[in-house]
Amino acid sequence: MNPAPTFHRLLLVLFLGTAPALAQAPRLTLPDPSPHASVSQRVGLTDITIDYHRPAVGKRKIWGALVPYNEPWRAGANENTTITFSTPVTVGGKQVPAGTYGLHMIPTPTTWTVALSTVSIAWGSFTYDPKEDAARFTVTPTQAEHEESLQYRFENPTETSANVVLHWERLQVSFPITVDTKAITLASLKGQLRGLAGFSWQPWNQAAAWCTRNDCGADQAMAWVDQSINTQRSFPNLTAKAKLLEKKDPAAASKLRSEAMKLATETDVNALGYQLLGEKKYPEALEMFRKNAKDYPESWNVHDSLGEALATTGDKKGATASYERALTLARDPVQKKRITTVLAGLRQ
């Protein structure tokens, strides 16, 4: 039996079977005329990200031509421009759940419609369907300096809001995003405290302090600071509870502060001094800094802090004396140079 025909037939089958694959040459990665870009902004605990491609103007007429009026536009190039929110937000006055959305715009010569579609995986706006909108609102474009490549940016970020700006050619549009940062942070803290953080006193106290600073509910703050104290009594959590009690029960607050001072370290007292200084409670702040200077006379830092407090209250002579003492005790060349500079300013 001659094996050659069988072998030749096998080669033919293999060749024919692989021919289509061999015919498809691999695609090379080359520069994109509309390069990919992304921009992000954190608002409170909420992360907002816009993912898009940046077409250039070139010598083309953009509005009403390359980008037709009264038709959905992908607000970028190539596949969907997307906007992602890590928490629920309000966009253009419309409430939107956390998630990723296709960002589309419908320009006209006077006003634009901005739409956030629940479909974020489409190519461009060719299959855009307004029935799939999570939010839709109207904005008014404004004239701007020339921007060759389409750009997104965030402006005026705060703890609760930021404005999204699209800028291309000589036109820009803007729309606001707002976040209920207090509610989101409160929910986040509750979740974090159910994890490993809940086994230490410090996180409970940090959560209580955040509530106090942000007027986010005295009852919740009290519950958290009590949990912190039950886990381990400390200067920070006793003074935090005293602050919560000072209006409702001044006597109990005073008693807690006395207990707290027995547990205070140099760092604790210094931090309290700066807190009082920031609140412009100058006599109370000076009392803390002077206590530290008496209790830790060989610490350059306590004299430095006392000097700062005295300078803040206008006592240049006292501030100079404290800074001079700090300079004799400091060993770090950087700190010595800084204190020398401060003293030169006080002596002018």
Image (spheres, grey):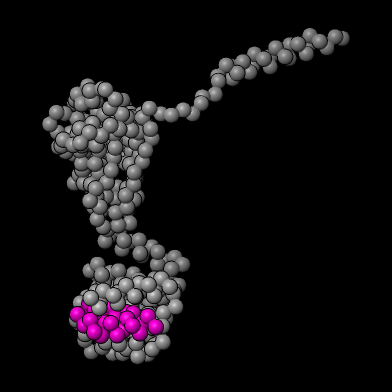
Residue 241, quarter of the rendered image: bottom left
Image position, residue 176 (x, y; %)? 21, 46
Image position, residue 30 (x, y; %)? 46, 28
Q: Is residue 108 above or below residue 338?
A: above
Tell me, yes or no, if residue 148 can be seen here. Answer: yes
The magenta-colored residue range is 303-328
Q: Residue at x 31, y 61 (%)?
A: 185
The residue most toward the left is 110
Q: Is residue 325 above or below residue 50?
A: below
Q: Is residue 115 above or below residue 339?
A: above
Image position, residue 211 (x, y; %)? 28, 69
Between 227 and 73, the one nearer to me in the picture: 73
211 magenta-colored? no
The residue most toward the front is 348
Q: Residue at x 36, y 29 (%)?
A: 34
Image position, residue 261 (x, y; %)? 34, 88
Q: Residue at x 68, y 17 (%)?
A: 14
Quadrant of the drawing holding the N terminus: top right
Between 221 and 74, the one nearer to me in the picture: 74
310 magenta-colored? yes
Q: Residue at x 44, y 78 (%)?
A: 331
Task: Name the dominant secondary structure of the magenta segment.
Answer: helix
